[in-house]
Image: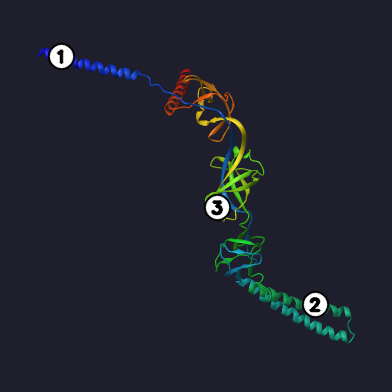
Amino acid sequence: MKKFLLIVLLIVFILGAFAAGSYFINSNQKSVETFETAKAFKSSIVRKTVAAGTVIPEDEVEIKPQISGIIEKIYVEEGDKIKTGDLIARIKVVPNEQSLNSARNRIKNSKIVSDNAKIAYDRNKALFDKGIISSQEFERAELSYNQAKQEIRNAQSDLQIIKKGSVGGSAANTNIRATVSGTILVIPVKEGDQVIESNTFNAGTSIATIADLGKMIFEGKVDEAEVGKLKADSDLKVSLGAIEDKEFDAKLTFVAPKGVEESGAVQFKIKADVALDDNYFVRAGYSANASIELEKKNDILVIDEGLLRFDSRNEDKPYVEVETGDQKFEKRFIEVGISDGKNIEILSGLKEDDKIKIWNKKAKKKDDEKSTDATDDESEDDETND
């Protein structure tokens, strides 16, 4: 019985020792990891920025009435194409009671003055015919009578304007006509609405907005970090949210001299003339993105930006690892230039035939962790010294 127990214990000990040895060997065994390499190459880099905005007509004209009143009839609809002089709407004049009463009283007063002037005229004419008074006195009486009659006509015309908006059969003021040719964009009023005339103290009610949709511009904003690189007459590519797989050529015409702060960043307004395509109908107000070329370099030495690393212990200087032997690499700091998000320019530190380590995902992650740990250690040392 004792021999059996000793045998069992021996077997358990041997199995335990074997398992512990296997774990120790596996935990200390280093996996062999190989890295592929890549080379720098000659290419062109175009640095661009994207400005968000809208496409709008170059000119929009608001049509406003010359008199106040109520919209009696609208003859056009939004989207209609019209020419200069086409009738848009007709206004029915609603006279002001106070103005109407003043005009009527003015006519009455003018008639009283005219009747009195006629009596004086008839009397002086009889005396003049008999040679009793001079021609000068008669002409003075005749002038006063003629002025009184003209005042009656003026008062009657003013009354008609107040009541009908025009004199005689003319409807020039009550008929609202287009002042330019184009497309009706907006009709903000409807029949029965009251409108106010445009005058020195009031902008007036807008009855319609007209624009030429054949002349469109892009209006957007760019960040202050990029506005200094914009040049007049630069070429843009405008893509519209409503029209897929189509880019319109545009030319930069305006950059605002003053920026506006939005969400903590200063934005500058830009405008560009858009070259339209007859195969596409572009509506006013389409959202758009404009791709603007800021900088371009041809035939320069570049590498894939994914090969680049940054040394956090050395002011985040960029570096790559260059192969010096079979799977042996050395750290080499380089100077970089412009980037398009995929490739980056190499100014110095690399040659075209150098083999650069392609970072594996796991190795890259470990390297990042080491850099972070080193930074944390430095921070702790600084705190200890403090």
Examine the rendered structure and indicate whether residue 124 appears above or below residue 94. below
Residue drawn at the location 88% of the way across and 80% of the way down: 135
Q: SS class of the residue under badge 3? A: strand
- For the residues labelled 1 and 2, say whether their Cβ atoms are less than 8 Å apart: no
Pointer 2: what residue? 144
Proximity of marks 3 and 2: CB atoms separated by less than 8 Å: no
Camera-side residue: 131 or 273? Answer: 273
Label 3 packing within 10 angstroms: few (<14), some (14-19), many (20+) = some
Residue type marked 1: Ile
Quadrant position of residue 354: top right
Whether residue 210 sits left or right of residue 30 in the image: it is right
Quarter-of-image position of residue 262: top right
Residue 224, placed above or below residue 184: above
Image location (x, y in percent) of residue 34: 43, 23
Q: Position of residue 314 (x, y in %)?
A: 53, 22
Mark found first going from the N terminus, 1 or 3: 1
Q: Is residue 206 visible?
A: no
Query: Up-down: is 320 above or below 285?
Result: above
Residue at 55 percent across and 28 percent down: it is 40
Q: Which residue carries the number 1 mark?
A: 7
What residue does disc 3 label?
286
- Find residue 106 and report its horizontal and vertical position in percent: 69, 75
Quadrant housing the N terminus? top left
For residue 111, say whether it is visible. Answer: yes
**How many residues crowd mark 1 within 10 Å: few (<14), some (14–19), many (20+)?**
few
- Mark 2: amino acid: Ser
Given residues 330 and 214, the one toward you in this image is 330
Badge 3 amino acid:
Tyr
**Number of the front mark, 1 or 2:** 1
Observer-nearest of 68 and 293: 293
**How far, Cα to Cα, is label 1 from label 3?**
88 Å
Q: Secondary structure at mark 2?
A: helix
